[in-house]
Amino acid sequence: MSGVGKPLTLNVPEPECRPGDTPDFTDFEIPRAGAVARPPVDVAADDIRDMAFSIVRVLNKDGQAVGDWAGSLTPDDLRTGLRHMMTLRTFDARMLNAQRQGKTSFYMQSLGEEAISCAFARALEPGDMNFPTYRQAGLLIAADYPMLTMMNQIYSNAHDPLHGRQMPILYSAKAHGFFSISGNLGTQFVQSVGWAMASAISGDSKIAAGWIGDGSTAENDFHAAMVFASTYTAPVVLNIVNNQWAISTFQGIARGGVGTFAARGHGFGVASIRVDGNDYLAVHAVAKWAAERARLGLGPTLIEYVTYRAGGHSSSDDPSAYRSGEEPGAWPLGDPIDRLKQHLISIGEWSDERHAQADAEILSDVVTVQKQAEAVGTLGDGKAPSPRDVFEGVYETMPPHLIRQRQMAGY
């Protein structure tokens, strides 16, 4: 006969730092730059299990590039990458201000995460397809997608290529390897695997890249994608952007007890790596390595980018309600733009003066384009897409009942 047992309890993870607390990252283990070796591209997943618990880093505290992962980019490449990141940050700032002014309904920044998308884009080939989330606008910036077109989409004006049928910032650009962003988080991951499988089935040479945030890895789409990617050795790079915070919950809620997000790949037999997401050189090197594995038919690679969301989750989020205001500045991996700037200065390929000049030029360019977009229209002013567009773009041949509805609406 059993007696009354001890009441059951649950573990609810809590972040170590809340509003009003002093940020403390002393328990955050950061390996020295260059400490993680670069394995052969055809390495077996089981032979690099430890890479899911370390962090690939190239830039050291003095701004020098060290280790096996260094040396894949020229100074011109790095200057281009720096300019891409600076452009994205300036673009973000202008568009967030535009949202505050009522010119668009919604915006999401990449503040502090610019190196991830900007560097990754330079590791792909034309025709490869990204399945991004809403914080990978750098994939478009680095692929020379017209900034004016991005702004028109944000403003939902008459020149919006999506005709006002998507939320602001949910871009779509097939020719630039950028699959339509979905507001339903997690869907992109499994779709990227399906696209990669289709590419292999058709005998093509193009690979896919899936993107997901730390919070969305708790959704079932993540696990479905991992099953199919590993079972069929799909030519895909699977990217987890761990920026420490979902909209109001810290990354420990979604991570569970596995230790790191990259370690989740072990259960599926997938090669898994963590990389310093604020190190442009490290991101590019790891992305290039993973892309080569996919092209050689060696299957998927799961990459966890360790970074920090310096701004709010979106224009409708107030991070001061759930984290310390001092935490972004205390983040130990620093700022991606400042780190690449210091590296270029350390090798004699940049200067504070050139940086200030570039900053001014980029701001001028962005403001000029913004004026062009606003001359067409914004959310509440100017030319908007035609209501006729509501009926278009769904069926190859519009069915009779929609034709009648369109006619009744006067179009």
Image: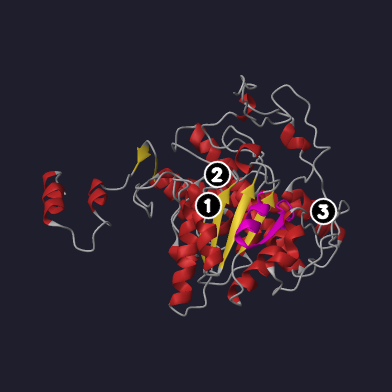
Q: Which mark is residue 222?
A: 1
* Magenta-drawn segment: 261-280
Spatial separation of the CA atoms under disc 3 and disc 1: 37 Å
Nearer the observer, disc 3 or disc 2? 2
Look at label 2 and name its amino acid. Ala
Q: CA distance from mark 3 to mark 2?
A: 37 Å
Q: Position of residue 275 (x, y in %)?
A: 72, 55
Residue that badge 2 annotates: 218
- Residue 270 belongs to the span the image colors magenta: yes
User: Which residue occupies the foreground of this view, 97 or 133?
Assistant: 133
Identify the residue under disc 3.
Answer: 342
Magenta region includes residue 233: no
- Quarter of the image where the N terminus is located: top right
Q: Residue at x 14, y 45 (%)?
A: 410
Quick check: 231 left or right of 29?
Answer: left
Residue 239 visible in image:
yes
